[in-house]
Image (cartoon, grey):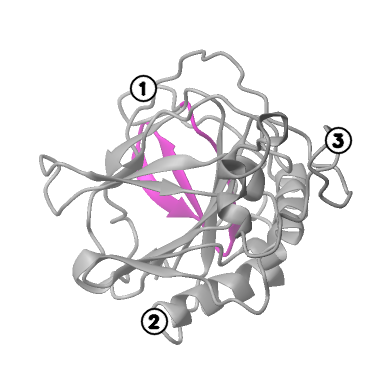
Amino acid sequence: MITEAHSESVPVCPFTTLVDARWHPDSVNALHAPPPGIPASRYHRHAPPHLIMTFDLFDALPADPDTPPASEPLGAGAVVLRGFARDVDTRLLATVDQVSAQAPFRHLITPGGLRMSVAMTNCGEAGWVSDRTGYRYDPVDPDSGAPWPPMPEVFRALAERAAASAGYPGFAPDACLINRYLPGTRLSLHQDRDELDLRAPIVSVSLGLPATFLWGGLRRADKPARIRLAHGDVVVWGGPSRLVFHGIAPLPDDDHALTGRTRINLTFRKTR
């Protein structure tokens, strides 16, 4: 399912710190509400040079509860729900910490004996694992011999809500693979095909650093589209797109207000 990854070092690109103050054109420390009539997403084009913010800073801001998330189709049965998880982002990240305290992140070994650069852990009734015997779902954490941590309710509720919004009501995930990316880490093109029930969709949640999502076709040779995924974006795919090849391009080095130099991905599946 998952192929080998490659890592490399890239210089850090820090960004401006957000300060809780009212906007004033002469202040170097006050940068918040833009002038009336200027959307926040375009504020950097109008602010004085010393008040410019990078776009990624807005990735850390909470979603406006009165504005429904934008939906962008990727193909038949596949959609990006922009900002869908932002309303629970801090709860999700705190829960990732709780899960990884019970089942620590680890770098799995492929059947060919290579070490994956993406660090992984799981929660739910089964966890996705890889070793020299192959790729599979296992109800037991091979590192501890204990069952994987139960799937937290905040995880399950988000996955069900996102699936329903994408046209897959009744989705009942029983596994969540948690991937941790550091700068330079990538995930090669692959299909999610180790699940017994391929009728259920995949729900993938992005947290932290933005990434370039590679969305290919039903053949590995198909050239993938490149889609930017920001903090809180959720991708859902199923139906005709269920076995599309997909991956993540090498993660650029940057710093996110909530996760630092890290991207977290939650991938929900129904394994049987």
Closest to the camera, between mark 2 and mark 1, is 2
Closest to the camera, between mark 1 and mark 3, is 3
C-alpha gap between disc 2 and disc 3: 46 Å
Q: Predominant secondary structure in magenta?
A: strand
Q: Which mark is residue 113?
A: 1
**What kind of residue is marked 2?**
Tyr
Which residue is more in the foreground, 192 or 140?
A: 192
Res 151 visible: no
Residue 197 in the image, given as x and y percentages of width and height:
32, 71
**Badge 2 density bin: few <14, some 14–19, many ≥20, Cα 10 Å:** some
**What kind of residue is marked 3?**
Asn
Label 2: element kind: loop
Q: What stretch is highlighted in magenta?
A: 117-138
**What kind of residue is marked 1?**
Gly
State which quarter of the image contains the N terminus.
Answer: top left
Question: Which residue is located at x 14 percent, y 54 percent?
Answer: 218
- Give the labeled residue for mark 3: 29
